[in-house]
Amino acid sequence: MRKIFKYALLFAAACTLSMTFTACGDDDDDNNGNAQTTENQKQEALKNIVNTYLNDVVFPTYSNLADAAEKLYTQINGLRIKLNAGTNVTQSEIDAICNTYKLTRAYWEESEAFLYGAASDFDIDPHIDTWPLDLPTLAKDLGDNAKISKLNSEDGIFWARTEGNLTPENLGFHGIEFIFFRNGSNRNVSIFNNDAVEDDSNFTGLDVHGKEEVIFASAIAGDLRDKCYQLEVSWMGSKAAAAHIQRITACKQQNAEEFQTTVAKNGLSYGENMLAAGTAQSTYSSWRKVLEEIFIGGCSNICGEVADQKMGQAYRATTSGGISTHIGEDGTPEEDDPNYIESPYSFNSYTDFKGNILSIQYTLYGGARLNSEVNNSIMNYLNDYAPNIGKELKNRLTVALSALDKCQNSGKAFVQAPGAPVVKEAMDAIGELNNYLVQASDWILQN
């Protein structure tokens, strides 16, 4: 009864004071209503951002990557077939392969702001993009007639990627790069036509010729193609090219575990899983958690890799005057490697790094290869709701890209001068960009 009496007194007091506070009550209702309206608008905006991100950034990037990798394999395999038949190839064919390689490489680097999905879950990233090469082992493999015979067979692609047959470091992009580029230039066709012996010091004493190199390159290019198809199918599901889905289905029959294409928790494609955010079916509890993944698992992650690893390892090892270390992913110190240089044979390192930062730009702007933001973009959302953060983030992005342009225009490839001052400038600029990516992510998550 005491509780009832208390509530009765409170009710009476409320009635007595109702005339006095009517206006205040109306303001509170308006404020709550406005806040709810704003939140509803944000939710709708975030949903539209994710749709645009998938349809205009992720999907076309992976589709273009898959198509380019297919073309690269077709060109290299055509070279293999001609050389097997005793037919000479032309410099224009070698140049065409080099051009397609660089195009494929560009699409791959422009996808690295979303490595958090299938590329990481299925170990596709390390499978196709590990460096430096293990050249001594590659030399032995190319000088092994039994292995060359396997690579040259109908099942050469499957044999190449089967664990234990080839060294993992020699698969993917950089094994192909070594075959077709040296010292920043396309290799001369005479290497392949005149049965010239491979002259890299690791091949001394081995009878390795251009034909064996092309056989190797064809098999691993086929594996690269399949892995790029896997990325496309994993994200796009049934929206991926039908022929690519068919090829992945055939790869699954050979090795189902290696060619998974769906999110383990729910069996959805990675795109479907993202679009189901906020439902019990998705691994994302809200649209804001999707944005956190995009910012931290994607953009921030690649910022850190470019500044601290891709550029940082060789820079620190070169400028330290001795042994230098960095903190590894497990939190323990790791020794820096002066040879940890991406794309050293094509001199494409700076282009690779810029592609990585451009992948952040395309993510923020809402479209692959866009130079300005679209309406349903992360950057436009920040412009609307947190303009100071948006302005500073865009500025840091511009500074980072300009620093990489300065590296590209320095007159020396990264492999030639990894300790140059312009490298440190770029590392610092990319690190600052990373700081603002984290800040923007935190703001979106909390507001």
Image (cartoon, rainbow, N blue to C red):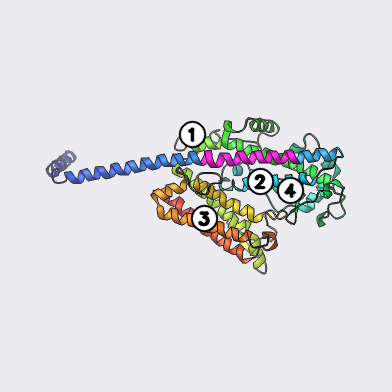
N-term mark: 2 or 3: 2
- Tell me where residue 335 appears, x and y as whole percent: 65, 61
Q: Main secondary structure of the magenta part?
A: helix
Which callout, 2 or 1, points to the residue nearer the camera? 2
Residue for point 42% across, 41% down: 45
Which callout, 3 or 1, points to the residue nearer the camera? 3
Residue for point 81% across, 37% down: 81
**Disc 3 vs disc 1: Cβ atoms closer than 8 Å?**
no
Cα gap from disc 1 to disc 4, whole angstroms: 40 Å
Which callout, 1 or 4, points to the residue nearer the camera? 4
Q: Tell me which amino acid carries mark 2.
A: Leu
Residue for point 53% across, 52% down: 300
* Quadrant of the frame with the N terminus: top left
Res. 367 visible in picture: yes
Q: Tell me which amino acid carries mark 1.
A: Gln
Lateral position of residue 444 relative to residue 342, left or right: left
For label 3, the residue is 397
Element type where label 1 sits in the image: loop
For label 2, the residue is 103
Element type where label 3 sits in the image: helix
For label 1, the residue is 281
